[in-house]
Image (cartoon, grey):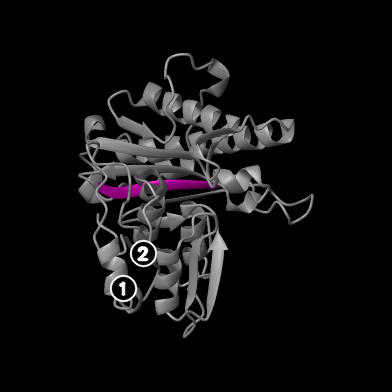
Amino acid sequence: MASPALLMRVVASAYSVAEKAATIVRNVMSAGDLGIVEKAGPNDLQTKADRLVQMSICASLARKFPKVTIIGEEELPTDDVTEDLIEDGHCEEILKKPCPAQYTGIKEEELVIWVDPLDGTKEYTEGLLDHVTVLIGIAYGGKAIAGVINQPYYNYEAGANAVLGRTIWGVLGMGAFGFQLTEAPAGKHIVVTTRSHSSALVNECIAALNPDHVIRVGGAGNKVIQLIEGKASAYVFASPGCKKWDTCAPEAILHAVGGKLTDIRGNSFQYNKEVKHMNSAGVLATLRNYDYYASRIPNTVKESLVP
């Protein structure tokens, strides 16, 4: 049998690396000392979990795939990573799946991996644990083509016998796995948006959509999960603040199941290694009915947000 294509090996490794990351996230929380550092202010935090997880993910993937470009949220030295942070396993089930034909010839140096070690850090520090995700997005030719999202605390309120945590993954042209794809209730307009980064513009944009309900949660990964599990019909964030590592993995998973994620003006994101990190023009995403929401974004909002 032919050896699995590089892309499938990277995704299979990212799956195991994300599970290791979840263990680190839970261990830091249960040890009780989060080691919180303010980066740009009280809503831009970094914890010991962000730091350790980034080291673990980046070092583990770089060791296996040395020519892949890996870009992570936290600025950290890559050298002194202790062996206990290295994960060299992979998910066997992913390796058994055939790689979509358009990606079989990819070389290591053509891939860019965007890592958010802990998406929803502020919520993590406040104990809103189900908001927290670990994001590993894989880009090729500037496009998000595969992603892994781990929720370390999935099921944490479901009682002692529940399995804690889950890993969702997807590849364009193949689909997405690890969750039950569900569409939002027909005829209902439920918008999911930011919890801790609101602004007049964010609220003006949501009001223009005249939603039946607004859900405010932390983390871009968590918001896209709301879409693919049918809890929300649109993710709307009319503000800069989101970065490429926030959107790469969720976008790949959403696109793999037929959804759409763009900036507020309808432009696709580019994920090549030279691209700027900030998504200056916000985010608009849906599983279905993208045009309904896109057509209702006010021009005043679009003009305020320059890509």
Reading the image, the residue beneath label 1 is 294
Which residue is located at x 48 percent, y 26 percent? 55
Residue reaching furthest right?
A: 160
Instruction: Please indicate, yes or no, whether residue 1 appears anywhere in the rendered image.
Output: no
The disc, 1 or 2, on the residue closer to the chain's N-terminal end is 2
Question: From mark 1 to mark 2, how far is it between C-alphas?
Answer: 8 Å
Locate the N terminus by quadrant. Answer: top left
Residue 214 % position (x, y): 53, 72
Disc 2 packing (10 Å; few <14; some 14–19; many ≥20): many
At label 2, the amino acid type is: Leu
Q: Which mark is residue 259?
A: none
Which residue is located at x 29 percent, y 60 percent? 305
In the image, is 176 to the left or to the right of 5?
A: right
Which residue is located at x 27 percent, y 25 percent? 67
142 falls in the magenta region: no
Locate the C terminus by quadrant. Answer: bottom left
What span is in magenta? 143-150
Q: Classify residue 137 by image quadrant.
A: top left
- When the figure is inspected, residue 250 is found, relative to residue 72, above or below; the finding is below
Residue 245 % position (x, y): 38, 43
Residue 220 % position (x, y): 46, 53
Q: Classify residue 290 by image quadrant.
A: bottom left
Q: Are marks 1 and 2 in contact (CB under 8 Å)?
A: yes
Reading the image, the residue beneath label 2 is 284
At label 1, the amino acid type is: Ala
146 falls in the magenta region: yes
